[in-house]
Image: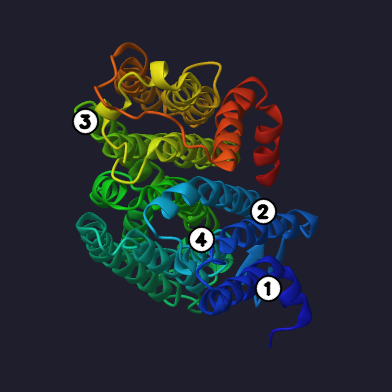
Amino acid sequence: MPNLNDILIMLPEFYLVVAACLLLLLDAFMKSTERPMLHWISIAVLLVGIYLLIAGQPAQTVTAFGGMFVRDRVAEILKVFALLTTAIVFVYARPYLIDRKLVTGEFYTLMIFAVIGIMLLVSAGNLVTVYLGLELLSLSSYALVALNRDAKLPSEAAIKYFVLGALASGMLLYGMSMVYGASGMGGTPTLDLAQLHHVSSYTTSPKLLLFGLIFMIIGIGFKLGAAPFHMWIPDVYQGAPTPVTAFVASASKLAAFGMAYRLLDSGMGDLAHQWQLILAVLAVLSLAIGNLVAIVQTNLKRLLAYSTISHMGYLLLGLSAASPEGYAAAMFYAISYALMSVAAFGVILALARSGFECEEISDLKGLNQKSPWMAFLMLLAMFSLAGVPPLFGFWAKVLVLEAAIHANMLWLSIVGVVFAIIGLYYYLHVIKVVYFDKPAEGSVLAAKPDISLRVVLSLNALTLLALGLYWGPLLGWCRSAFGL
């Protein structure tokens, strides 16, 4: 039976559920002229959630509901940055939603429910909790992608996302059922990740366990957007409303890392020698497909989609090390990628207008002449994504490459360096268009007058430079989560 202690451990999650339900009620009873207030209330809800996480974080790892929910330092860090990136997306989304008459309570409540899914996923101590968190995040994301019902492309993207997401969820569930079955052959069947950690030592059906592991990795690969499970990413990134794309590209990748860590280390840690090589192969495929296909893209959102695939390859480098150092590097990479990608999409949102989405690379021609500050912010985002020193993205790449070397996978680090150099091309191409191409006639490349967007976007992009120069404390926080 649940007790008061269980509820206190899950207080941030319960708080967000209540807040999301109240926002739905507010939206139902508000007048249309009052509806913009939902924006500021939603941001306040997320900031209070961050406070509850940090202020109430216990010194030691604690569990609730019989070990189904784990509250530890890993979960705390991922939740804080998931809430923070979602709040940033809310700020960036406001002018976009107003221009397109999409300011509805559904956007904010679905976003908050998606964040609750992320929080459950990264705190999962049981296979049931993993699946519950994943589905809450996924179902909210499908609806968000189809938010603009009057446009054809978002509906098409949502259907593709739903079909492929359902397929991946089915494979993950099938894998979980096989792992559960293998745990009952030679012992008591269990869904608890801590107990599954040692299942390989007593199960009488190691092949069934291995098959289950492979199907679970397919589910993880889909959620990360790693090749060859990346088919949904370009279409969803291009078709979804840009604020939703920014969310899927940033906060949901933190969830994917949390899911991978819980399933692979907490649950299948004894089989690390089996899944290490599988993750290394997925990393190489993601680096190759992501970087090579990005070179030929003309649509900026599709370019960033293939960029995401390549970045997930680097994140898998850290995970494939299967060591506390590798996990800390991968978490650091996930955080850096979330902040970099949300900054890049923030510039797109700042330049978009009703009737002008600013989605083609050619739309950025002459941005430096029209809006030098926006051009500089885009330069910081692109160079950080490319891993140019001394920006944040450079240190993130260095750490995962170092972790792979320490795990005796020098070949994998060499592959990572080669594709980092190849990836420079398409990021530099965007900068070249911004700074050296002449603006098209009649183009309106000026930042929106929305003060909150300009201030937060400037802080977001400058943070990439600040963390590039002073990244030690954040890395220390990530390393402490894994006992380093």
Closer mark to the observer between disc 2 and disc 3: 3
> What is the CA distance from the residue labelled 2 to the residue labelled 4?
19 Å
Name which of mark 2 and mark 3 comes first in the sequence.
Answer: 2
User: Is residue 274 visible to us here?
Assistant: no
User: What residue sits 57% from the left and 64% below the top?
Assistant: 38
Closer mark to the observer between disc 2 and disc 4: 2
- Amino acid type of the residue that numbered disc 2 sits on in the rendered structure: Glu
Mark 2 touches mark 3? (CB < 8 Å): no
Name which of mark 1 and mark 3 comes first in the sequence.
Answer: 1
Residue annotated with mark 3: 298
> What is the CA distance from the residue labelled 1 to the residue labelled 4?
17 Å
Closer mark to the observer between disc 1 and disc 4: 1
User: What residue sits 76% from the left and 72% below the top?
Assistant: 8
> What is the CA distance from the residue labelled 3 to the residue labelled 4?
42 Å
Mark 1 touches mark 2? (CB < 8 Å): no
Of the pair 278 and 378, the residue shown nearer to us: 378
Residue annotated with mark 1: 64
User: Is residue 79 visible to us here?
Assistant: yes
User: What residue sits 29% from the left and 27% below the top?
Assistant: 443
Residue annotated with mark 4: 267
- Amino acid type of the residue that numbered disc 4 sits on in the rendered structure: Gly
Q: In the rendered view, would you say 354 is above or below 445?
A: below
Name which of mark 1 and mark 4 comes first in the sequence.
Answer: 1
- Amino acid type of the residue that numbered disc 1 sits on in the rendered structure: Ala
Of the pair 475 and 66, the residue shown nearer to us: 475
- Helix, strand or loop status at disc 3: loop
> What is the CA distance from the residue labelled 2 to the residue labelled 3?
38 Å
